[in-house]
Amino acid sequence: MRIALDAMGGDFAPQNPIGGLKLALAELPQMERVFVVGKPEVIQQEMDRQGLSDPRIEIVAASQVVEMSDSGLDAVRRKKDSSISRAVDLIKEKKADAVVSAGHTGAAVTASLIKLRTLPGVDRPAIAAIMPSVTKFWLLIDAGANPDSEPQHLVQNAIMGSAYARHVLGRKNPQVGLMSNGTEEDKGNALCKEAGKLLRRTEGIHYMGNVEGHDLWDTPPDVVVCDGFTGNILLKTSEGIAHAIFSMMKTEIMSSARTKLGGLLARPAFKRVHTKTNADEYGGMPLLGLNGITIIAHGGASSYAMKNALRSACETISHEVNPHIEESMRKHALMHV
């Protein structure tokens, strides 16, 4: 597997992308080649600092960096030699199988869409995020690629999400729910109501209707569909709540000798829950629907998270997600001629 790593993307670049690469090279032998894209002198200096030297690494020069203040489209148009643009070019040129970036999400989405295009039947790509619950993991789609979606885009998200849940999460007949403010069919905004009508008529998916926020943490469906604006707020709010809960628990546990003792006894359980709810464990989120593979990591991703983003890229390649999505979209088109 050949991976292109945007070494200049993220709040802690190139330190954490390089640190994640070091961890990944030790754990993921399936990575045959890694193209580390960015400013060569900066990359080499960081690799030397971390003691990273591996024959599988090839540094690819890119003179520009996309800043968070840049717009996604302008970043691609004005910064043609940016690290994310050059990394995506490697997929377009068939030199790499996937790109991993913790940089500007809009730039990564825009560059991937313009350079790679979408799979047949897909209008817009969507970010898929694996989320935890009491009973199982589930898939949130779209987690931020398209803030302004149309009803047919949510139908495509349901089809892509179902294909991912089936072939990556191992769900035989994945349930699909539509994020709304009530389970009744007449609840929701105009987008939800129209998308619900279309989803009820869509063959090939197991649509179960609307789901509310409190449904997501106990017995959620396998796939939860929404627009990228709603999905990104839900994703970041969930991560923030998880962090806040553990901070409050730590404060209360340290408040007395008795609670310290109880915390020590319960430490293994707390650690398991923390691992399950820690975004770093999932690393990166695939941008589904592209004629290629792009993995989006958090801007503040740690080295450990970047390692897991690289692992996610390998898993997306090995599970042949794109051919499965393409087949699902083809069947959908035939059913609705």
Image (cartoon, rainbow, N blue to C red):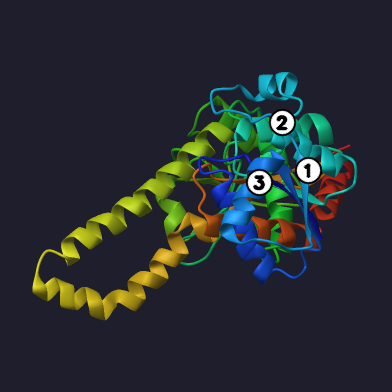
Of callouts 3 and 2, the N-terminal one: 3
* Residue 113 position in % (x across, y down): 77, 32
The answer to whether residue 325 shows anywhere in this view is: yes
Q: Check disc 2 and give the amino acid type.
A: Ser
Residue at 70% from the left image edge and 66% from the top image edge: 172
Quarter residue 270 falls in:
bottom left
Q: Check disc 3 and give the amino acid type.
A: Ile
Q: Nearer the viewer, residue 112 or 86?
A: 86
Q: Which residue is mark 3?
A: 43
Badge 1 density bin: few <14, some 14–19, many ≥20, Cα 10 Å: many
Secondary element under disc 2, as helix, strand or loop, is loop
Quarter residue 93 falls in:
top right
The reply to whether discs 1 and 3 touch (Cβ–Cβ < 8 Å) is: no
* Residue 230 position in % (x across, y down): 51, 35
Quarter residue 175 falls in:
bottom right
| Gap in angstroms between the C-alphas marked 1 and 2 | 10 Å
Location of the N terminus (image quadrant): bottom right
Of callouts 1 and 3, the N-terminal one: 3
| Gap in angstroms between the C-alphas marked 1 and 3 | 10 Å
Q: Nearer the viewer, residue 47 or 234?
A: 47
Residue at 57% from the left image edge and 31% from the top image edge: 193
Reply above or below: 309 against 254: above
Secondary element under disc 1, as helix, strand or loop, is strand
Q: Which residue is mark 2?
A: 63
| Gap in angstroms between the C-alphas marked 3 and 2 | 12 Å
Q: Which residue is mark 1?
A: 60
Badge 2 density bin: few <14, some 14–19, many ≥20, Cα 10 Å: some
Please tell me the numbered disc located at residue 161: none
Q: Check disc 1 and give the amino acid type.
A: Val
Location of the C terminus (image quadrant): top right
Secondary element under disc 3, as helix, strand or loop, is helix
